[in-house]
Image: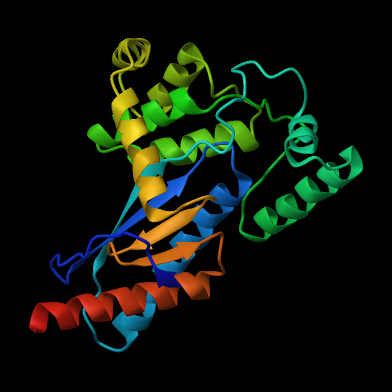
Amino acid sequence: MTDATGAPGATGAPDVLAVDVWSDVACPWCYLGTRRFAEGVRRFAGARAAEGRAVPEVRLTHHSFELSPDTPVDFDGTAADFLARHKGVPMAQAVQMQAQVAELAADAGLTMDFARVRHTKTLTAHELIHLAHAHGRQAEMVERLFRAYFTEGRHVGRTEDLADLAADVGLDRDEVVAALEAGTYADAVAADVAQARVYGITGVPFFVLDGRYGVSGAQDPAVFAAGLEQAASDSTSGADD
């Protein structure tokens, strides 16, 4: 865990711990990292409760980051094809890399079927995530997009397909279509990308705890739990000063 470059100090109430994560829908490590973070939150809360200490509410907000902004909406090839071209590695190595992350995902209770993945540009999906946040459905929407992309082989780059997925989490389909076609949340996505540059984020997932501490990557849940404990303790100390 490191100081988040350029991150503003946070002095919020000690009963709420804000966490911001930059991630991409097409990033397997982001899906795995989100799941490991959730387990870290569970361990953090459990340890505090067992010691009779206050348990802050951890509020996670997802922010946009495109790993491959030059990807076409309808990519001609498999996820392994894209990885091989993007990383400049042999196809056999690309397939092996995907198999390794799928095995780690399975250990966390996730299914990643790379043979079914339909690689695409994720910009519009990020706009949808912002719309979902405005309706209090961001966590559900992010999970639905990850599962659609990595497990079900659904297309997450086109408006109509995204609207179907949004309806699955209780959002109004017609509203979603209208907002995505109008680019209502395009500026919000651009603001996230700009903030990532300020923080010096070059890879995702990247978690910022309480506006002060950065945790990069799909870390072990114990790392997240320790980071949350440090952020919570420091926040409480600051409030007592």
Could you tell me which quadrant the C terminus lies in? bottom left
Q: How is the image coloured?
A: rainbow
Say above or below: 151 vs 157: below
Q: Residue at x 37, y 82 (%)?
A: 47
Instruction: Give the side of residue 229 with respect to residue 77, left or right.
Output: left
Q: How many marks do you count on the picture? A: 0
Q: Residue at x 45, y 68 (%)?
A: 40
Q: Residue at x 56, y 60 (%)?
A: 218
Residue 178: image x %, image y %?
A: 31, 10
Q: Quadrant of residue 121?
A: top right
Residue 72 visible:
yes
Residue 217: image x %, image y %?
A: 55, 59
Residue 8: image x %, image y %?
A: 24, 60
Say above or below: 170 vs 50: above
Instruction: Give the side of residue 110 with respect to residue 171, left or right.
Output: right
Residue 225: image x %, image y %?
A: 43, 74
Residue 139 visible:
no
Instruction: Give the side of residue 18 with respect to residue 154, left or right.
Output: left
Q: Nearer the viewer, residue 41 or 178?
A: 178
